[in-house]
Image (cartoon, rainbow, N blue to C red):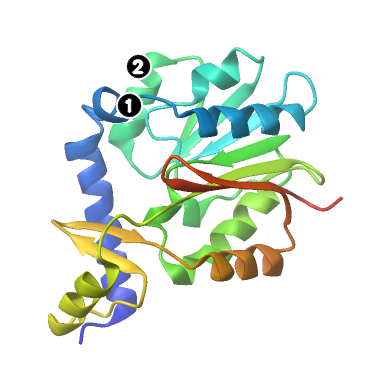
Amino acid sequence: MADRAEWIAERRRINELRMDSLFAPGYDDHWGRINLSHRTMLARLLDMCPSGPRILDAACGTGKYWPLLLEHGARIVGTDQSGGMLRQARAKHPEVPVVKAGLQELSFTAEFDGAICVDAMENVFPEHWPAVLARLKKAVNPGGPLYLTVELPEEDLAETYAAALAAGLPVVAGEYLNDGGYHYYPDPSQISDWISATGLLVADAITDDGYRHYLLSTPR
C-alpha cells in the first residue's frame, strides 16, 4: 500500500491541476447558480457581522458568492490554492484582493469580521480537518461568524472504498475516488466532534441542496 502522506501530497497536486485546467474555465457556466440555502446562510452570517464587514472567502474559487457579499458592503479577501480559479475571480472582480493559498496554509490572525468556506471542504482530507478549522477560526475576530458547508454523498461510498483498497490505495472510510477526482464525506458526528474540539460554537445548522450548512461562531 502507498504511503498515505505521500499520497495526500500527490492528491493535492492533482486536485490543483484539475481545478486549473478542467474546472476553472467553465465553472460559472456549470455551477454558477446560487442555491436558496446558501443565500439564506450567507444572509445570516452578514447579520452577525458589523456594518461593512471584512470577510474572508477561503477556497473562493471563481468568486461565486462575492456579488452577494459586495452588495451588502462587505470588503472581501479571497484565497484559493488554484491559480486558475483566482484568475477567473479577478477577471470578474479586479477590486477584490486574492491570495493563492490552500486551506491548509491559511495564516491570518484576527483579520476578519467573518469568514466563509463554501463548497470546498469535500476536498479536505480527514487528517487536515482539525487544522483547517483552527486556521479559519484564527482568521476571524473573537465572536465573529464562520459559514461552512459539507457536501452530502451521492455515490456508493462502500463500493468505491473497497475498489480503492483493492488497488492498494491508502484510503480511509468516507473517501471517494472517481475519474481522477477526490472527495471526503465525514459522518455528521465526526464533524460535530471536530467543531467542538476546535472551540467553535454552532449558531445554526441546516441540511439542504445537497449540503450540510453550518453557521459557527468563534468564542469571545
Name the foreground residue: 170 vs 151.
151
What residue sits right under mark 2 in the picture?
A: 91
Seen at 22% across and 64% down, the residue is: 177
Q: State the image quarter where residue 56 is shown.
A: top right
Seen at 26% across and 62% down, the residue is: 11
Q: CA distance from mark 1 to mark 2?
A: 6 Å
| Callout count | 2
Where residue 132 appears, as percent x and y from the top left, is: 55, 58
Secondary structure of the residue carrying numbered label 1: helix
The kind of residue tagged 2 is Ala
Where residue 81 appears, as percent x and y from the top left, is: 38, 45
The N terminus lies in quadrant: bottom left
| Residue sitting at the far right | 220
Name the foreground residue: 29 vs 205.
205
Q: Against 148, is 47 above or below?
A: above
Seen at 49% across and 26% down, the residue is: 65
For label 2, count other residues whose C-alpha is less than 10 Å away and answer few (under 14), some (14-19) or many (20+).
few
| Residue sitting at the far bottom | 1
